[in-house]
Amino acid sequence: MDLQKPAPIQDAGPRVAELRASDADRDRVADILREALAEGRLTADEHAERVEGVLHAKTVGELQVFIRDLPAAHQRSAGAAYATAPSRPTPGAIPAEADANVVAVFSSAMRRGRWRAGRRLHAYAIFGSVEIDLSEAIFEYQQVVIKAVSVFGDVQIRVPENISLRGTGGGVLGNFEVSPLDSAEPDAPVVYVDGWAVLGNVEARPKRGKLVGDILERVQDKLERVQDKVDRKMRKHLDR
């Protein structure tokens, strides 16, 4: 690192196909494969082989290989699936004043559990540590901004893995790292992390296995409907 210059500002993330696949991504592809099996587009052996590949896929692009010859995949991609969230919040959507501040000076502070996330949260770690865990938070707004400043400190931010995550910031002899994330849900919350790390650390990434509850419920309802459809097809076939 050039000690005379701050680290470059981090902004736009990689293409969607290059992003690491989440459990929600795998469930989405498995959903399409179950529909294809129920419609007779795939044989039982083809379905089993593709599901095995889905379980071992590491990126979103690898997942798409297993459904690219199925109409349902193109119908969803033409719609809202993987609608890339903008790199910056909508102008005027976020107030200038913070809804809440989390400050740690020679100490530690945290916000986690079941709590309501406002539109703007400020986190300051000065010779201390701050933890912001949104994995069980209630999102009342679709866009949330977290301003994180670390000076000889550490700010850790965790989000559900089925939302979108963006970051803009940098480090001065420190580390500013935001793992970009895109949700398959068009109305999923988007968390924007802004800030600086001065001889400190700011890190934001998804928390594996944690999903926004209302989105999870919609996915589960859809899976149950598809499973019912598969069951009816199987019963009809066995009754012949």
Image (cartoon, helix red, strand yellow):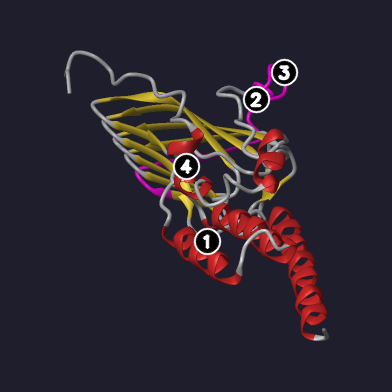
Q: At numbered mark 1, what does the secondary structure look like: helix, strand or loop? A: loop
Mark 2 and mark 3 residues within 8 Å of each other at the beta carbon: no
Q: Mark 2 points at which residue?
A: 97
Q: Mark 3 points at which residue?
A: 92
Q: Name the residue under label 4.
A: 61
Q: Pointer 3: residues within 10 angstroms few (<14), some, or many (20+)?
A: few
Residue beneath the point at 49% across and 65% down: 49
Q: How far apart are marks 2 and 3 (CA)?
A: 12 Å
- Residue type, numbered disc 2: Glu
The dot on residue 209 is 1
- Residue with the most extreme bottom position: 239
N-term-proximal mark, 1 vs 4: 4
Question: In which quarter of the view is residue 118 placed?
Answer: top right
Q: Which of 143 and 174 is in front in this view?
A: 143
Q: Where is residue 113 in the image (x, y as percent from the top left)?
A: 59, 59
Q: Distance between the residues labelled 1 and 4?
A: 21 Å
Query: Is residue 221 rendered to the left or right of residue 21?
Result: right
- Residue type, numbered disc 4: Gly
Mark 3 and mark 4 residues within 8 Å of each other at the beta carbon: no
Q: How far apart are marks 2 and 4 (CA)?
A: 39 Å
Question: In which quarter of the view is residue 239 placed?
Answer: bottom right
- Residue type, numbered disc 3: Gly
The stretch of residues the image draws in magenta is 90-108
Q: Distance between the residues labelled 1 and 3?
A: 33 Å
Magenta residue check for 75:
no
Q: Is any part of residue 131 visible from this angle?
A: no
Q: Which of 79 and 218 is in front in this view?
A: 79
Q: How far apart are marks 3 and 4 (CA)?
A: 34 Å
